[in-house]
Amino acid sequence: MRRLGVIVNPIAGMGGRVGLKGTDGPEVLARARALGAEPVSGLRAARALAELRGVAVLAAPGAMGAEPCAAAGLACAVLDGVTPDAQGTREAARAMEAAGVALILFAGGDGTARDVAGVVGTRIPVLGIPTGVKMQSAVFATSPAAAGRLAARVMAGEARFREAEVMDLDEEALRAGRVSPRLHGVALVPEERALMQAGKAGAAVPDEAALDALARRIAGEMQRGRLYVLGCGTTMRRIKRAIGFEGTLMGVDVALDGRLLAADVSEAQLLRLTEQAPATAILGVTGGQGFLLGRGNQQLSAAVLRRIGRENLVVVAGAMKLAALDPACLHVDTGDATMDAELSGYIAVRTAPDRSAMIKVAA
């Protein structure tokens, strides 16, 4: 019988809600835990695995695979001697390739994707359950449930495959104020545009003048006494600069009365602030991927979004960025199925001072 390999990075995504950019390295992980971060990858992996039935599974031990399998009601054979770290991830991928698995289903972020793909290359298919903070690579499904459905198709022999980019942020460029994903290799993934996210793409140059004008318009429209929660990325940075502050490129900031109130906030800070005043959230769109929520802005959790209200979400993106989306829709992956359903439908996306486009939002 065809077997499925399962690898879970137990600490992936822990930094998201507490305002960190990841959990790479022991110091960052310790800081995340000190801020109250809790593991999320096991729950998201179990949500994906729950889509599978009657599949033979070879899993990494404990929280790296066997425990999420058990939570999803899947029996599995367990690898021995695998440590819960990057080296253990690579060892598990190597053992699964040697065992002849039909697919490695892994839960993590771009670092985990690099570890797995760096071992197996394009020799066997891989598929990412999105559990990291940013996830620039094109090897991830759009949500845990989508990953599970795709894995089921692969195991049933019903999938076709393509090569996809394994990306991660260029840290030197990030320090210089640029979001610049770097290509680290390619992997073989299921070919399904509706369920797989694309790789991160940069902004289109012709959009820049319209976005600068729109940023000034939005800054001028802001109401006194109202909080403005500003998402991450270069489009949001234009708005932050138009208000009058530099802000955090890869974080969520809050403005009030034309000034920066709180920088690089966590979910807990947003919950406290939105108790005190009405709020509007202004969101950008991830280039090439179309994500509004769930990629790099996990601070905007379901609890925070319920405080703000869907009617108080403002979406800003360049017209060419929207035109390049394939399929032509926006994605949300908050980790809360009810909230994702509430956010689905159509939303106006502002592209210039007097222009907007209605775009479908899908969970």
Image: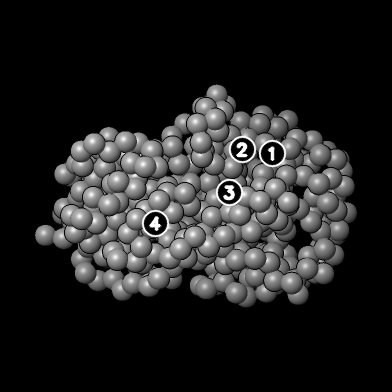
What residue sits right under mark 4 in the picture? Answer: 118
**Helix, strand or loop for disc 2:** loop
- CA gap between label 2 and label 3 equals 9 Å
Disc 4 marks a residue whose amino acid type is Gly
* Mark earlier in primary sequence (2, 3): 2
**Quarter holding residue 55:** bottom left
- CA gap between label 4 and label 3 equals 24 Å
Q: Nearer the viewer, residue 51 or 339?
A: 51
Badge nearest the viewer, 4 or 3: 4
Q: Nearer the viewer, residue 345 or 91?
A: 91
Question: Answer yes or no: do the residues labelled 2 and 4 have beta carbons within 8 Å?
Answer: no
- CA gap between label 1 and label 3 equals 12 Å
Q: In x, y percent, where is residue 49?
A: 29, 49
* Mark earlier in primary sequence (4, 3): 4
Question: Answer yes or no: do the residues labelled 2 and 1 have beta carbons within 8 Å?
Answer: yes
- Which residue is pictured at 78% across the width and 68% down the height? 208
Q: In x, y percent, where is residue 318?
A: 71, 68
Q: In x, y percent, where is residue 283?
A: 67, 54
* Mark earlier in primary sequence (2, 1): 2
Residue 271 appearing in the image: no
* Mark earlier in primary sequence (1, 3): 1
- Which residue is pictured at 72% across the width and 65% down the height? 350
214 in relation to 31, above or below: below
Which disc, if any, is residue 264?
1
Outermost residue toward the left? 1
Which disc, if any, is residue 19?
2
What residue sits right under mark 3 in the picture? Answer: 296
Disc 1 marks a residue whose amino acid type is Asp
**Helix, strand or loop for disc 4:** helix
Disc 2 marks a residue whose amino acid type is Gly
